[in-house]
Image: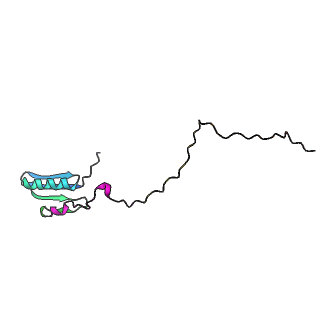
């Protein structure tokens, strides 16, 4: 059985031939379609929002997207906590020979107890 896709905005309208139910992904496209249906002579044009609110033709202005901030996306500040800087590690190259000279150590031989 095919799983139905969920469409956030449902636009419906009725004309002399029947009713139309059309789903749209965002508010701007749903409003554009609803206004087109009104121009084409559809009656009882409604838009259902993702939260289940049904808007009549005179309430479409409430669905208009408002500009929340005048800043561009890159200029907006985040409330995310800044990470600590990583500790600097010195890189060790395995192929490079050690520059440390081996110090001479005297050999006392096997130790015997008497």
Who is closer to the viewer here, 67 or 3?
A: 67
State yes or no: residue 16 in magenta: no
Q: Residue at x 50, y 52 (%)?
A: 86
Q: Return the x and y of residue 63 as percentages of the image width and height.
A: 19, 61
Q: Image quarter for residue 111? A: top right
- The x and y percentages for residue 4 are 27, 49
- Observer-nearest residue: 76 or 41? 76
Choose top left, top right, bottom left or bottom right for residue 49. Answer: bottom left
Name the side, left or right, on which 51 lies relative to 13: right
> Vertically, is 100 above or below 55?
above
On the image, the x and y values in percent for residue 12 come to 15, 55
Residue drawn 21% across the image and 52% down it: 24
What residue occupies the far right of the structure in this picture?
114
- In what quadrant of the picture does the N terminus appear? top left
Task: Determine the residue positioned at 31% across, 57% down.
Answer: 75
* Spot occupied by residue 93 in the image (x, y as percentages of width and height): 57, 39
In the image, taking residue 112 as reference, residue 56 lies left or right, namely left
Residue 96 location, quadrant: top right
Q: Main secondary structure of the magenta part?
A: loop
Q: Is residue 62 magenta?
A: yes
Q: Where does the magenta region start and end? A: 59-80
Q: Quadrant of the C terminus?
A: top right
């Amino acid at each position: 059985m095919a799983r139905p896709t969920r469409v956030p905005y449902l636009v419906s309208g009725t004309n002399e031939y029947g009713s139309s139910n059309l789903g749209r992904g965002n508010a701007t496209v749903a409003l554009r379609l609803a206004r087109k249906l009104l121009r084409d002579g559809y009656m009882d044009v409604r838009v259902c929002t993702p939260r289940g609110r049904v808007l009549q033709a005179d309430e479409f202005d409430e669905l208009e997207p408002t500009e929340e901030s005048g800043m561009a996306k890159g200029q907006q500040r985040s409330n995310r906590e800044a990470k600590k800087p990583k500790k600097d590690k010195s890189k060790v190259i395995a192929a490079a020979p050690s520059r440390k000279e081996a110090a001479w150590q005297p050999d006392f031989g096997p130790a015997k107890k008497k």
